[in-house]
Amino acid sequence: MWEILILLILSALAYKITDGLIPNLKDLFVKAGLYGVDLCKTNKDKIPEAIGVVSGCVFLVTSFLYIPIVFGNGLMDRQHFPHNEFAELLAGLLSICCMLLLGFADDVLDLRWRYKLLLPTVASLPLLVVYYVNFNSTTFVVPIQLRYWLGVSVNIGFLYYIYMGMLAVFCTNAINILAGINGLEVGQSVIIALSIIVFDIIELRGDQFKAHIFALYILIPYVATTLALLKHNWYPSKVFVGDTFCYVSGMTFAVVAILSHFSKTVLLFFLPQIINFLYSVPQLFHIIPCPRHRLPKYSAETDLLTASRTIIAKKDFTFLTKFILQVLTILRLVDKIEDKESVTINNMTVINLFLIKLGPQSEAQLTKKLLCFQVFCTCIAFVIRYPLASYFYDKLE
Amino acid sequence: MWEILILLILSALAYKITDGLIPNLKDLFVKAGLYGVDLCKTNKDKIPEAIGVVSGCVFLVTSFLYIPIVFGNGLMDRQHFPHNEFAELLAGLLSICCMLLLGFADDVLDLRWRYKLLLPTVASLPLLVVYYVNFNSTTFVVPIQLRYWLGVSVNIGFLYYIYMGMLAVFCTNAINILAGINGLEVGQSVIIALSIIVFDIIELRGDQFKAHIFALYILIPYVATTLALLKHNWYPSKVFVGDTFCYVSGMTFAVVAILSHFSKTVLLFFLPQIINFLYSVPQLFHIIPCPRHRLPKYSAETDLLTASRTIIAKKDFTFLTKFILQVLTILRLVDKIEDKESVTINNMTVINLFLIKLGPQSEAQLTKKLLCFQVFCTCIAFVIRYPLASYFYDKLE
């Protein structure tokens, strides 16, 4: 356990360093043209963008420095050095480093959409290879109720690798689309990371404790550097985190999920992101018109945010548009204003949904409520994972 | 050997892809403010900078895709999978990926000098750790003539790691300071890489063949992507490669040198860079005034380059300045113009030395001559490595 103690000390240092570096490097980013203007504020200051690369780099370097400590025991006894675990850690860091590079390149160069889906796939390659080499277990355990038809477990073979590749793409993009107000991306990432850490600590007594210690090695420095970033990104933001941050966070969660074999549990902690994704699907696939930004609308007079809206011309109605609108209206998930020629609804993100349900509010309040929702979902996730899972499975896996 | 064949096919594809991507992505770089103006040309077009990140990314992705093929044999027999070799390759790629990220960040953000020395050290950490774990051989074999005093080999312990860290810093910066005219950075890197490849092929029959195959795995895709870059960077340059390229190249050579255990031989192939570095020392350490750029001077009328110069005021003369000037004059290594109050000499780089020895010439000619010099030095390196080394060592190591 002394390794974890050293990791905590190193991570505290990493927090301090990130916290000190961000204000120091801010001007370099603005000078390089990496800045944006906060659309939900009255002042139009240049706010540095892509600062996630700073916390990401410190996170990586901390992990590098930690490698000799983790494997210190192994080094005493060179014959039995756990080369496979070492390779796992390296592959995980390689995937994260790759994502950091590609995310930063995306922030600087503003790559096209198709690259955003391609890049995480490419970056997850080392991870999938090490999974193939070290485990290559591609079976899903079947819930008791279905075993009569499917057997105890189903080997999905190559599809499992597709699933893991998709997981990386999902994790990186899911955080990226539940974003846009100060502190939300970073806040939700911290909560997800802390949720996984709690889960790891609970499971440390189990027979999979090695996998859970591995997850802690990666997540503790991640949380430390991300907290420092949150301090500067919290309302009112002095820095923006950029796609870099969302990519790195998503890949970090994917690495932990894949190499520690609890991808289903990690997905449970993504409940708000999954809800947001499903809710966004009609707009993402352009069944309902999707403006370039779906951020809430800011009113300078009241300093409050209200839901932003999209207009659907009635002449463009297809059967599918009608059907979706009907379902959403029945479920009370849209705020609809209809006139003779068109229907106006809120943009379909969880952020806008909160605004139509809870009324206009300040940015800071909205972020806090969304983060509370994230914590609430974590509680639900634990209920699903523990009491409920035993109904579907004999032994927790 | 079929693995090498697949590698050649993959590398040919990587060449094609890099060659196609560079013109496609050029405008994105200019739009992001990543461009420069060629100081040795009359037209003042915006030329995209830091394009080395494109070839670097394709190089990395090619290596990722190649991993399952290299370790294909190992996977058939999972019990004897060479986890240590796998970890080596991952650590090497991690160091290169890290350098790519830091180099690109440097190009975008224009970091300060101290970072330029720090970054390669940080990026070489994974490499040093894997060296520690897999080999931890920190002995130098002593030349026959000195064995009477030192014994057959000397274990320098921790110093060996300092040496390896310095090697990464040297390789990255050595290429960076022998640069400034179209195609020179990329050209010299290709020649160094090809020299190491020839050396590897010669040594494939030896007992260290595994290490040499490892070097080929890394160098072949490197050469392929770099050749595509050279095509666009050759006189007249349509793209600039940026510090990104120098960093990635330097780290690639350091990775090969360290993990394949022939760092001394790799250093032999850096002869022109070492000469350039030693010649630059008086200016780098500001014993002789050093202007911000030491590029040759371009004359728009003649379209020729001449050596650029620096002025030393006589009142600033120290003993050291006088001594160095004296030595350089005796060795005929400077072109000195003296008047009552000051001495004017050429900036001390190999590029300017060529210009004072061979007279003013066009940029394309100068690059070609410098590259011929690099090839000539490779020949000398082989003479030192083979006939001469047997005079100092019983068995080549």
Image (cartoon, coloured by chain):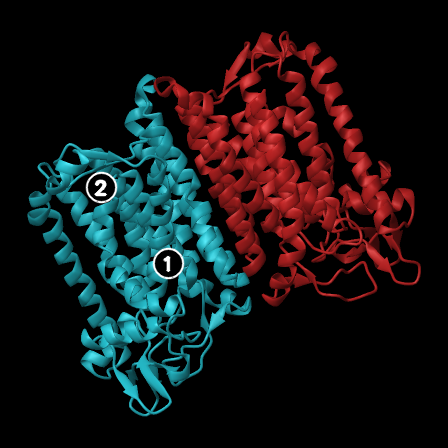
Chain colours: A red, B cyan
The C terminus of chain A lies in quadrant: top right
Residue at point 35%, 34% (across, down): B131
Q: Position of residue A300 (x, y in %)?
A: 88, 62
Q: In front: A274, or B79?
A: B79
Q: With respect to residue B244, does B77 lie above or below?
A: above
- Residue B337 figure quarter: bottom left
Residue at point 40%, 74% (across, down): B290
Q: Dot 1: few (<14), some (14–19), or many (≥20) neighbours within 10 Å?
A: many
Q: In front: B264, or A89?
A: B264
Q: Disc 2 marks which residue?
A: B5
Q: Position of residue B373 (x, y in %)?
A: 18, 66
Secondary structure type for disc 2: helix
- Residue B31 figure quarter: bottom right
Task: Name which residue type carries label 2.
Answer: Leu
- Residue A325 figure quarter: top right
Task: Name which residue type carries label 1.
Answer: Asn
Q: Dot 2: few (<14), some (14–19), or many (≥20) neighbours within 10 Å?
A: few
Q: Disc 1 marks which residue?
A: B173
Residue A385's disc is none
Q: Earlier in the sequence, mark 2 or mark 1?
A: 2
Residue at point 67%, 48% (across, down): A19
Residue at point 58%, 65% (across, down): A32
